[in-house]
Image: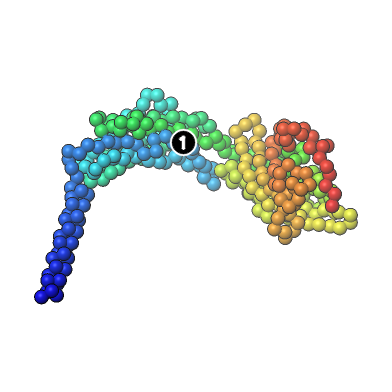
Amino acid sequence: MKNILKILFVFMATGALFFSCENEATNFDALVKAPDANASYYLQFIDAAQSFETGVTVDGDLIEIQTTISVVLMGSPQAQDITVNLVVDPASTIASDMYTLSATSITIPAGKTSGSVDLTTIATNMPAGQQMELIVNMDAGEHNSPNPVGTKIDYMLKRIEFCPLVNGVADLVGSWSGEDAFYPSIITTAVDGNDLAVSGMGVGLITDWWGETVTAGGTITMTVYANGIVDIPRQYLFTTDYLGSPSDYEIIGAGKWTNCGAHPTLLITYDIYYAGEDKGIAALYGLTYGLPAPILTADITLSGKKALKVSDQVTDYHLLRVPFKR
């Protein structure tokens, strides 16, 4: 008899558990699938304050800013669509012909919690190098977020300051002056097919600080991209002599060109390597033997002069440094 009662008790308890779980599942479904039309809710923008900048393709074409303006529902999903009107604030400094919005309102579909519209710039109509401000206010009536920060979009939009080369690499041909590897230098360039032949990089460093004489080479090939990037693939740089022993050196580097000022400029970061070595001489020995940095840079201007940037304290580095002796 006791065994029968135990079996009946287990059966009843199990049935009660199933009933309880079924009720919980039903209640959960009711919360998720049957929104309360009378429930209060608020709306606010997501990421309301942001900054964006246009880009440039490898071919030199402008890349538009493309982003979304999104609104999120603060509360339970609603049984009907919600429409949020977007009102461009007159305090905006960007003109209406400099961007497009895919719609002037955002719809949050019934049962959903967010919606968005697309924002795309028209970069050709934007002034280069200037930040333009787009302010968009939310108009959802009584459902506007009580937090005013959440009801106003404030985007800073900037067209990159970029001046393309009119004649390709030919616009970068000539004599360049400035600082190269911590020394005042003159570097020359010439057209080499679609690339630039660059002569003179690293010579001041190798002959003075490194204490060797260049006996051959000295001209490298630099790839110039239309988007302002330059690339120096690893290659032979020059041959030197040190106490009668020749050494071959290689170079690798990258940087950028600009063409918006009075003269084109080049800013290149690189290092010089013993042929086949994994680390360059600046990385290996620079800080130990008196260089300001373990990397070399060329900051030069075409057909113009530029103040040296060796350091704030040292105005003539090659006079004040301690020469490296191997």
Left or right side of 106 for 271: right
Left or right side of 110 for 303: right
Q: Which residue, as the protein is rendered here, is positioned at the far top?
A: 90
Q: Amino acid at mark 1?
A: Ser
Location of the N terminus (image quadrant)? bottom left
Pointer 1: what residue? 51
Q: Nearer the viewer, residue 92 or 284?
A: 284
- Asked which quadrant contains residue 110, the reply is top left
- Asked which quadrant contains residue 318, the reply is top right
Left or right side of 286 for 25: left
Please provide percent x and percent y for residue 213. 84, 50
Q: In percent of the image, x 72 and y 60: which residue is there?
A: 276
Please provide percent x and percent y for residue 22. 17, 58
Q: Which residue, as the protein is rendered here, is positioned at the far right?
A: 243
Residue 29 in sight = no
Q: Nearer the viewer, residue 127 or 323?
A: 323
